[in-house]
Image (cartoon, rainbow, N blue to C red):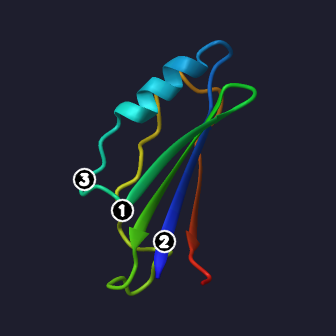
Amino acid sequence: MTVALMWEARAVPGRGPDLLAWARAQPLAPAPSRRETFTAPEDRVLVITWWPATTLADPHTANLPELPEPGPDLVRRAVHRWRFESAD
């Protein structure tokens, strides 16, 4: 089983490239099995990380490394976060 953590933020107008660079520079220790970063209109940045869940009692509440909240100079609202468990 795998747990996917999704982190999505919307940058202050015109700061999308800065938010993207900030998100890419954030370390996660330990490193996830996989990490992908996406962009979307309106200066949105999405980061998805994948974690093996075979040893986790509850994947939805497990203590896994997550990207922090960026400074208010970069984002126009609080970060949205979701956790998903593989259904396959």
Say if mark 2 contacts mark 3, CB within 8 Å. no
Image quarter in which the C terminus is found: bottom right
Task: Decide which of 61, 25 is in the foreground and name it.
Answer: 25
12 sits left or right of 33 in the view: right
Crowd band around label 1 with a 10 angstrom C-alpha radius: few (<14), some (14–19), many (20+): few
Give the Cα distance between marks 2 and 3: 16 Å
Above or below, 63 against 86 in this view is above
Label 2 amino acid? Val
Give the Cα distance between marks 2 and 1: 10 Å
**Residue 3 horizontal/vertical position (percent):** 48, 71
Label 1 amino acid? Ser
Residue marked by disc 2? 3
Give the residue furthest to the top: 14
Task: Decide which of 14, 34 is in the foreground and name it.
Answer: 34
Crowd band around label 2 with a 10 angstrom C-alpha radius: few (<14), some (14–19), many (20+): many
Residue marked by disc 1? 33
- Looking at the image, is mark 2 or mark 1 earlier in the sequence? 2
Give the residue furthest to the right: 41
Residue drawn 52% across the image and 25% down it? 19
Helix, strand or loop at mark 2 = strand
Residue marked by disc 3? 29
Helix, strand or loop at mark 3 = loop
Can residue 72 be spotted in the picture? no
Can residue 28 be spotted in the picture? yes
- The image quadrant that residue 30 belongs to is bottom left
Give the Cα distance between marks 1 and 3: 11 Å
Residue drawn 37% across the image and 85% down it? 54
The numbered mark at residue 1 is none
**Residue 79 horizontal/vertical position (percent):** 58, 42
Label 3 amino acid? Ala
Above or below, 33 against 71 in this view is below
